[in-house]
Image (tube, rainbow, N blue to C red):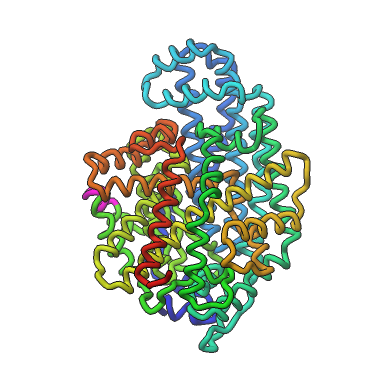
């Protein structure tokens, strides 16, 4: 059964219908569930052994190094345990066994963090200079050097051993809102069926909804939108309470660690200045004219009396659209990334041939796409590939993440391998930019060029403008709870409606159901996460511009960046590539480029 045939069918494929080559090989992580259980017992033993270091860290550099190493080993095992269980759960959220294993893995991770909660408070009883001297006497001085630097920087936000242990133990409770949202959104919610313009009944899923939003027929888009969003309207009280609980969790941790706000808490993890977040919003909202112009252009090209939010995703030149089978998408992505050099290309080839990617949608499988790195083996990439051009670009995006993880894990020690999300989205969106350039170079046809420009503009709309929209909404709702106000579902809907009108401008007629979209955004359960899509996109566009200009040494500096893991603060890592995110320049450059592309579409179509 082809994927296009599946999309036109009411039934959803089962796991057994998919060829093994298009599925993860979970044995790369654990041979079977029994091997997982053995590692689980090992983790429990290491948790118990942590207490042997209490009160002894200042005795010698060797003892401190051993404690840090044993904690790293334990956390790596916990990561493997959680990842194996959660990946299996994501493949079919209806299987209770993996739901239970995921909870057990989360629990032992919480126990591990609680067992070593004494470590930072005990270290911070040692003065800064002695800590630096002890680090210089470690058996390997390049493993925990950045950890010590960052520990000293964040000294005032680390609490006593007793408080740190309580905060670690609270992690299981803190996971509640995210877990509840995921279970509701991925397992319990059922979407209705609709009929397309040919009279074919289609059972809605997240992926099918996304594809229907690309339909050239407005009435199909409207029916899909109304059927899909009405489900979130009908669950708005539950989803509102879940999000409000998540905000209270954020506030609890920010106050427990003596941060000025939830934003300060979230950004301090990677030493991102709060001014970067606020500058992103202020610069963008002060320059929305290009976005408003694009909405007006869309309305004219589509020849619509009224343009609604569900009309902003469909291709403007559908006769130039086509389906891209998965194998063809692989070849296009491999060709597009050739400018990154043979080493990068060889790793990508290995990834596709070694089942790093779980390709197709199946019943019970989590929606969307992601890449999840693993230090011991290789990254795992989740797709729900449905043969659209957008899915091909998503594949390029997620493989950017995967290779970033792979190179960092191979280059850095475990304590320094994990990069920040602030940098992560550079690698993914740069791959998308290279894929677009690959197609632009291949065409001389004006209609095809318009289609590609439409694709790039829509990408900027989704990865930059919408993420700034989301970031400001997230800031506003956190500000509400920090002031002691309640976030009711009605208040959330009111704010979302205001942002819809502000960002889309006068050319868009905002319908009633669009005010419920906040209720289906999983990233709001990942505190102040979404802004990094926008900042990373701006940074990747700056680096891509350097590639296209032939700047000497930029490829080498970029490969160094994506091999650097977390060996420095992300702001510093990007500066090494010539991009300074503490200035408004990358944001302004992205906004100007967007408006230039809109003007080019207007020129090619003759729209005044």
Q: Is residue 270 left or right of residue 343?
A: right
Image quadrant assignment for residue 393: bottom left
What secondary structure is the stretch in magenta mostly built from?
A: helix
Q: Residue furthest front?
A: 608
- Coordinates of residue 470 in the picture (x, y in percent): 58, 52
Q: Is residue 465 visible?
A: yes
Residue toward you, 457 or 347: 457
- Residue at x-position 50% and y-position 49%: 83
Location of the C terminus by quadrant is bottom left
Image quadrant assignment for residue 161: top right
Query: Can you say whether 320 is above or below 62 in the image?
Result: below
Magenta-drawn segment: 340-347
- Coordinates of residue 266 in the picture (x, y in percent): 58, 37
**Magenta residue check for 100:** no
Q: Residue furthest bottom?
A: 199
**Magenta residue check for 346:** yes
Residue toward you, 572 or 367: 572
- Residue at x-position 38% and y-position 79%: 319
- Residue at x-position 71% and y-position 55%: 492
- Coordinates of residue 437 in the picture (x, y in percent): 30, 59
Q: Is residue 30 visible?
A: no
Q: Is residue 108 left or right of residue 559?
A: right
- Coordinates of residue 537 in the picture (x, y in percent): 43, 49
- Residue at x-position 45% and y-position 27%: 69
Query: Can you say whether 178 is above or below 254 in the image?
Result: below
Residue toward you, 63 or 570: 570
Image quadrant assignment for residue 65: top left
Query: Can you say whether 217 is above or below 539 in the image?
Result: below
Q: How many marks?
A: 0
């Amino acid at each position: 059964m082809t994927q296009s045939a599946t999309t036109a069918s009411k039934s959803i494929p089962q796991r057994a219908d998919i060829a093994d080559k298009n599925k993860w090989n979970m044995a790369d992580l654990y041979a079977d569930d029994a091997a997982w259980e053995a590692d689980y017992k090992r983790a429990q033993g290491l948790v118990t052994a942590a207490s042997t270091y209490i009160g002894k860290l200042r005795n010698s550099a060797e003892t401190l190094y051993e404690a840090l190493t044993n904690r790293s080993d334990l956390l790596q095992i916990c990561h493997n345990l959680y990842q194996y269980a959660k990946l299996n759960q994501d493949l079919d959220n209806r299987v209770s066994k993996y739901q239970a294993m995921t909870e057990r893995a989360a629990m032992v991770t919480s126990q591990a963090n609680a067992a070593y909660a004494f470590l930072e408070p005990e270290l911070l009883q040692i003065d800064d200079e002695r800590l630096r001297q002890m680090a210089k006497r470690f058996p390997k001085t390049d493993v925990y050097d950045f950890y010590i630097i960052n520990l000293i920087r964040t000294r005032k936000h680390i609490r006593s051993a007793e408080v740190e242990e309580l905060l670690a133990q609270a992690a299981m409770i803190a996971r509640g809102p995210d877990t509840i949202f995921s279970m509701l959104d991925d397992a319990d919610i059922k979407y209705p069926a609709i009929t397309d313009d040919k009279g074919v009944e289609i059972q809605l899923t997240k992926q099918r909804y996304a594809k229907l939003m690309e339909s050239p027929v407005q009435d199909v888009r409207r029916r899909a939108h109304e059927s899909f969003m009405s489900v979130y309207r009908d669950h708005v009280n539950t989803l509102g309470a879940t999000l409000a609980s998540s905000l209270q969790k954020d506030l609890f941790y920010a106050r427990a660690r003596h941060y000025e706000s939830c934003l300060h808490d979230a950004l301090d993890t990677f030493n991102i200045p709060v001014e970067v977040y606020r500058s992103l919003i202020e610069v963008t909202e002060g320059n929305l004219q290009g976005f408003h112009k694009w909405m007006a252009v869309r309305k004219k090209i589509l020849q619509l009396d009224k343009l609604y939010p569900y009309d902003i995703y469909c291709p403007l030149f559908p006769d130039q659209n086509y389906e891209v089978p998965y194998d063809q998408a692989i070849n296009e992505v491999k060709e597009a990334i050739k400018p990154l050099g043979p080493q990068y290309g060889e790793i990508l080839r290995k990834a596709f041939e070694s089942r790093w990617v779980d390709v197709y949608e199946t019943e019970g499988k989590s929606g969307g796409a992601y890449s999840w790195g693993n230090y011991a083996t290789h990254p795992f990439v989740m797709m729900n590939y449905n043969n659209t051009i957008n899915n091909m670009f998503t594949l390029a995006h997620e493989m950017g993440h995967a290779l970033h993880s792979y190179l960092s894990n191979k280059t850095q020690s475990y304590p320094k391998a994990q990069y920040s999300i602030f940098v992560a989205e550079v690698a993914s969106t740069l791959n998308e930019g290279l894929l677009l350039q690959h197609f632009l170079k291949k065409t001389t046809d004006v209609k095809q060029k318009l289609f590609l420009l439409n694709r790039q503009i829509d990408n900027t709309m989704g990865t930059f403008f919408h993420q700034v929209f989301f970031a400001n909404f997230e800031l506003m709702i956190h500000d509400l709870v920090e002031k002691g106000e309640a976030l009711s579902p009605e208040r959330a809907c009111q704010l979302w409606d205001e942002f819809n009108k502000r960002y889309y401008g006068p050319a868009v007629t905002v319908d009633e159901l669009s005010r419920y979209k906040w209720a289906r955004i999983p990233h709001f359960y990942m505190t102040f996460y979404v802004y990094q899509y926008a900042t990373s996109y701006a940074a990747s566009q700056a680096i891509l511009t350097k590639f296209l200009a032939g700047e000497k040494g930029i490829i080498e500096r970029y490969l160094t960046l994506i091999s650097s893991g977390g060996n420095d603060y992300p702001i510093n890592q990007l500066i090494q590539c010539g991009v300074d995110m503490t200035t408004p320049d990358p944001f302004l450059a992205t906004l100007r480029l967007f408006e230039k592309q809109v003007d080019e579409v207007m020129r090619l179509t003759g729209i005044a």
